[in-house]
Amino acid sequence: MRDIILCIGLFVVLSCKAQQDPLPLNTWMDNIPQGAYVKDLNNELNPYVGIYKGNYKGNEITLFINKVEHKFEKRTNKDYFMDVLDVKYIVENSAGLVLQDTSNGNFSNIKLYSLGVNPEDSSADFHYSGTNCRVGWGLINLKKLSSTQLSWEYYYKRRG
Protein backbone atom coordinates (compact mmCIF):
# COMPACT_ATOMS: atom_id res chain seq x y z
CA MET A 1 0.00 0.00 0.00
CA ARG A 2 2.85 2.34 0.86
CA ASP A 3 4.46 1.67 -2.54
CA ILE A 4 1.22 2.51 -4.35
CA ILE A 5 0.87 5.82 -2.48
CA LEU A 6 4.54 6.60 -3.18
CA CYS A 7 4.08 5.84 -6.90
CA ILE A 8 0.94 8.00 -7.10
CA GLY A 9 2.72 10.83 -5.27
CA LEU A 10 5.71 10.61 -7.58
CA PHE A 11 3.43 10.56 -10.63
CA VAL A 12 1.57 13.68 -9.41
CA VAL A 13 4.83 15.53 -8.76
CA LEU A 14 6.26 14.64 -12.18
CA SER A 15 2.98 15.42 -13.95
CA CYS A 16 2.61 18.89 -12.48
CA LYS A 17 4.14 21.61 -14.55
CA ALA A 18 5.73 24.39 -12.54
CA GLN A 19 3.88 27.66 -12.92
CA GLN A 20 6.05 30.49 -14.24
CA ASP A 21 6.10 33.85 -12.53
CA PRO A 22 4.90 36.69 -14.76
CA LEU A 23 7.61 38.58 -16.64
CA PRO A 24 7.88 42.40 -16.57
CA LEU A 25 6.17 44.36 -19.33
CA ASN A 26 9.26 45.33 -21.36
CA THR A 27 10.90 41.90 -21.38
CA TRP A 28 13.04 41.50 -24.50
CA MET A 29 11.37 39.18 -27.05
CA ASP A 30 14.29 36.72 -27.05
CA ASN A 31 13.87 36.31 -23.27
CA ILE A 32 10.18 35.38 -23.35
CA PRO A 33 9.75 31.61 -23.03
CA GLN A 34 6.99 29.68 -24.77
CA GLY A 35 3.65 30.13 -22.96
CA ALA A 36 4.91 32.90 -20.63
CA TYR A 37 2.89 35.84 -19.33
CA VAL A 38 4.33 39.34 -19.81
CA LYS A 39 2.47 41.36 -17.19
CA ASP A 40 2.14 45.05 -16.42
CA LEU A 41 3.63 44.57 -12.94
CA ASN A 42 4.24 48.29 -12.33
CA ASN A 43 0.98 49.63 -13.83
CA GLU A 44 2.87 51.39 -16.63
CA LEU A 45 -0.09 51.05 -19.02
CA ASN A 46 -2.68 52.68 -16.75
CA PRO A 47 -1.76 56.35 -17.46
CA TYR A 48 -2.73 55.90 -21.13
CA VAL A 49 -6.21 54.46 -20.50
CA GLY A 50 -9.01 56.84 -21.46
CA ILE A 51 -10.87 58.58 -24.26
CA TYR A 52 -9.01 61.18 -26.30
CA LYS A 53 -10.31 63.48 -29.05
CA GLY A 54 -8.36 65.42 -31.64
CA ASN A 55 -8.53 66.89 -35.12
CA TYR A 56 -6.38 66.09 -38.11
CA LYS A 57 -6.90 67.62 -41.57
CA GLY A 58 -10.51 68.51 -40.77
CA ASN A 59 -11.36 65.06 -39.39
CA GLU A 60 -12.28 64.47 -35.76
CA ILE A 61 -10.56 61.41 -34.30
CA THR A 62 -11.71 59.78 -31.08
CA LEU A 63 -9.42 57.21 -29.47
CA PHE A 64 -10.71 54.70 -26.93
CA ILE A 65 -7.70 53.26 -25.11
CA ASN A 66 -8.26 50.29 -22.80
CA LYS A 67 -5.94 48.00 -20.91
CA VAL A 68 -6.35 44.33 -21.84
CA GLU A 69 -4.79 41.75 -19.57
CA HIS A 70 -3.53 38.37 -20.69
CA LYS A 71 -3.85 38.98 -24.47
CA PHE A 72 -2.74 35.95 -26.49
CA GLU A 73 0.20 36.76 -28.75
CA LYS A 74 1.17 34.36 -31.53
CA ARG A 75 4.57 34.83 -33.12
CA THR A 76 6.31 32.64 -35.67
CA ASN A 77 8.53 30.96 -33.08
CA LYS A 78 6.47 31.15 -29.87
CA ASP A 79 3.11 31.84 -28.27
CA TYR A 80 2.71 33.81 -25.05
CA PHE A 81 0.37 36.17 -23.19
CA MET A 82 0.84 39.85 -22.43
CA ASP A 83 -0.91 42.90 -20.99
CA VAL A 84 -1.48 45.53 -23.69
CA LEU A 85 -3.18 48.79 -24.46
CA ASP A 86 -5.89 48.18 -27.05
CA VAL A 87 -7.02 51.14 -29.15
CA LYS A 88 -10.35 51.47 -30.92
CA TYR A 89 -11.17 54.64 -32.82
CA ILE A 90 -13.74 56.65 -34.73
CA VAL A 91 -12.82 59.04 -37.56
CA GLU A 92 -15.46 61.55 -38.67
CA ASN A 93 -15.18 64.23 -41.36
CA SER A 94 -16.15 67.87 -40.76
CA ALA A 95 -19.77 67.11 -41.78
CA GLY A 96 -20.03 64.44 -39.07
CA LEU A 97 -19.92 61.52 -41.52
CA VAL A 98 -18.20 58.51 -39.99
CA LEU A 99 -15.26 57.52 -42.19
CA GLN A 100 -14.09 54.61 -40.04
CA ASP A 101 -15.28 53.15 -36.74
CA THR A 102 -13.45 50.26 -35.04
CA SER A 103 -15.11 50.91 -31.67
CA ASN A 104 -18.14 48.73 -32.42
CA GLY A 105 -16.19 45.55 -33.18
CA ASN A 106 -17.25 45.42 -36.84
CA PHE A 107 -13.61 45.59 -37.94
CA SER A 108 -12.08 42.70 -36.00
CA ASN A 109 -9.29 42.47 -38.61
CA ILE A 110 -8.00 45.97 -37.72
CA LYS A 111 -5.71 45.78 -34.71
CA LEU A 112 -3.98 48.58 -32.83
CA TYR A 113 -2.31 47.42 -29.61
CA SER A 114 0.79 48.22 -27.58
CA LEU A 115 4.05 46.33 -27.81
CA GLY A 116 5.69 48.02 -24.82
CA VAL A 117 6.26 51.30 -23.03
CA ASN A 118 9.16 53.73 -22.83
CA PRO A 119 9.03 55.20 -19.29
CA GLU A 120 11.98 57.50 -19.97
CA ASP A 121 9.93 59.62 -22.41
CA SER A 122 6.35 58.70 -21.39
CA SER A 123 5.58 56.93 -24.64
CA ALA A 124 4.25 53.58 -25.80
CA ASP A 125 4.89 51.68 -29.02
CA PHE A 126 1.98 50.13 -30.90
CA HIS A 127 1.47 47.63 -33.69
CA TYR A 128 -1.06 48.78 -36.29
CA SER A 129 -2.37 46.05 -38.60
CA GLY A 130 -3.58 48.47 -41.27
CA THR A 131 -7.01 48.39 -42.84
CA ASN A 132 -8.28 46.18 -45.66
CA CYS A 133 -5.56 43.85 -46.96
CA ARG A 134 -3.19 45.34 -44.34
CA VAL A 135 -2.92 48.63 -46.25
CA GLY A 136 -1.09 51.10 -44.02
CA TRP A 137 0.27 48.63 -41.48
CA GLY A 138 3.11 49.85 -39.35
CA LEU A 139 4.17 51.13 -35.96
CA ILE A 140 2.82 54.01 -33.91
CA ASN A 141 4.63 55.76 -31.09
CA LEU A 142 2.14 57.41 -28.77
CA LYS A 143 3.49 59.96 -26.30
CA LYS A 144 1.66 61.13 -23.19
CA LEU A 145 2.12 64.94 -23.06
CA SER A 146 -0.22 65.59 -20.13
CA SER A 147 -3.23 64.01 -18.44
CA THR A 148 -5.41 65.14 -21.37
CA GLN A 149 -2.99 65.29 -24.32
CA LEU A 150 -1.31 62.71 -26.51
CA SER A 151 0.83 62.96 -29.60
CA TRP A 152 1.72 60.20 -31.99
CA GLU A 153 4.07 59.35 -34.77
CA TYR A 154 3.19 56.81 -37.42
CA TYR A 155 5.83 54.69 -39.15
CA TYR A 156 4.52 53.04 -42.31
CA LYS A 157 5.92 49.59 -43.15
CA ARG A 158 6.30 48.52 -46.74
CA ARG A 159 5.64 44.98 -47.88
CA GLY A 160 8.43 42.94 -49.35
Image (cartoon, grey):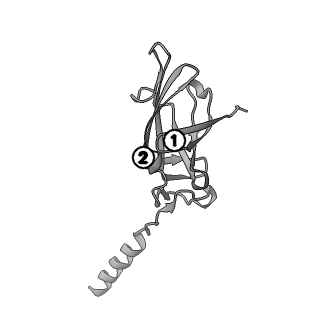
Dot 2 amino acid type:
Val
Left or right side of 43 for 7: left
Q: CA distance from mark 1 to mark 2?
A: 9 Å
Can you say whether 59 is above or below 144 in the image? Answer: above
Mark 2 secondary-structure assignment: strand
Say which quadrant the C terminus sits in.
top right
Residue at image point 47% right, 62% down? 22
Residue position marked by numbered label 1 in the rendering: 113
Residue 13 in percent (x, y) is at 39, 75
First in sequence: mark 1 or mark 2?
2
Residue 84 in percent (x, y) is at 48, 47
Q: Quadrant of residue 28?
A: bottom right
Can you say whether 39 is above or below 59 in the image? Answer: below
- The disc at residue 44 is none
Residue at image point 45% right, 14% down? 97
Mark 1 secondary-structure assignment: strand
- The disc at residue 68 is 2
